[in-house]
Image (cartoon, helix red, strand yellow):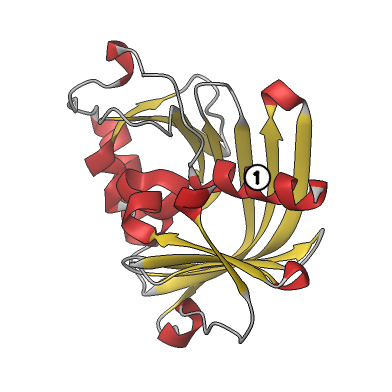
Amino acid sequence: MLRIKLFTMMLCLMIGLYPLSALSADTTPASPEMNPKLTKILKKLENRYKPTGFTARFAQESTVKALEISDLAVGNITVKRPDKMRWTYTKPENQIIITDGKTLWAHRPEENQVMVGKSPALLGDGKGASFLTDMNQIKKNFKITMTEESTASHYKLKLIPLKKTSDLAVIYILISTKTFDLTEIITYNAYQDETRIQFTDIEFKKHIDDALFTFDMPDGIDVVRFDEQ
């Protein structure tokens, strides 16, 4: 039971479902004019991710600060523009998170359970790394600045949501200065809970089967709504 609770907490942290205290006014500014360098970086990022989609391996570390617990997980991700994602976790146990742009499913085979919710409500405005399906979301939904932690190998950008939300405080993304691959996403909520996702072996694809982004409910599976958590 504890393992199930931990998974639910980490999943909610990953897709941005934990409630936050109200964000202060300075975290919800009007969209500013970006400097030419930053505009150029974002343009190259968008061009890099113009193909139909991509696959990659990922390593995810999620930390709930108040409880002093962390969870490490690895797996594979498949993304298809403009709104489809499939996260397949292989360690520490098998789990799958799928969205077809309308519905989100989180399946735990070992517990014979699937959590279900509406994708726009859970992943709207760039939450839950949903901007991976459409890099244009970054400019539309966030105030973007380059941090002093940018290096010769990676640009590190800070993304603050333009709209007040109850579930997202700030996101940092790392972009390769050579390839313009997005190699890491770091998400925080107001309680400083953190989700850090690193991507490797990124491969861009012209064709990806839509069947990967649907979930067929097995007979007898326990269905739980996200809004019941």
Q: Position of residue 75 (x, y in %)?
A: 70, 64
Query: Where, by quadrant of the figure, is residue 53 drawn?
Result: bottom left
Q: Name the residue rendered at 63%, 40% in the picture.
A: 196
- The picture places residue 47, in percent across and down from the top left corner, at 32, 59
Q: Is residue 140 left or right of residue 5?
A: left
User: Front-most of 197 and 191?
Assistant: 191
Q: Is any atom of residue 180 visible in this view?
A: no
Residue type beneath disc 1 = Met
State whether residue 210 is above or below residue 191: below
Does residue 102 appear to the left or right of 180 in the view shown?
left
**Residue at position x 61%, y 87% from top?**
219
Decide if residue 100 is on the left or right side of residue 193: left
Along the line of sight, the residue nearer the viewer: 220 or 10 = 220
Q: Mark 1 highlights which residue?
A: 10
Identify which residue is drawn at 24% across, 32% down. Answer: 36
Q: At numbered mark 1, what does the secondary structure look like: helix, strand or loop? A: helix
Q: Residue at left 40%, top 51%? A: 122
Front one among 20 and 174: 20
Q: Quadrant of residue 184?
A: top right
Question: How many numbered marks does the figure carry?
Answer: 1
x and y, in percent, of residue 33 in the image: 17, 27
Q: Is residue 184 left or right of residue 146?
A: right
Q: Is residue 125 above or below residue 142?
A: below
Give the quadrant of residue 143. Answer: top left
- Would you call the spot at circle 1 few (<14 residues within 10 Å), some (14-19), or many (20 or more)? many
Comparing 157 with 78, the one in front is 78
Measuring from the top left, give residue 132's x and y in whole percent.
42, 56
Task: Specify whether residue 143 is in view.
Answer: yes
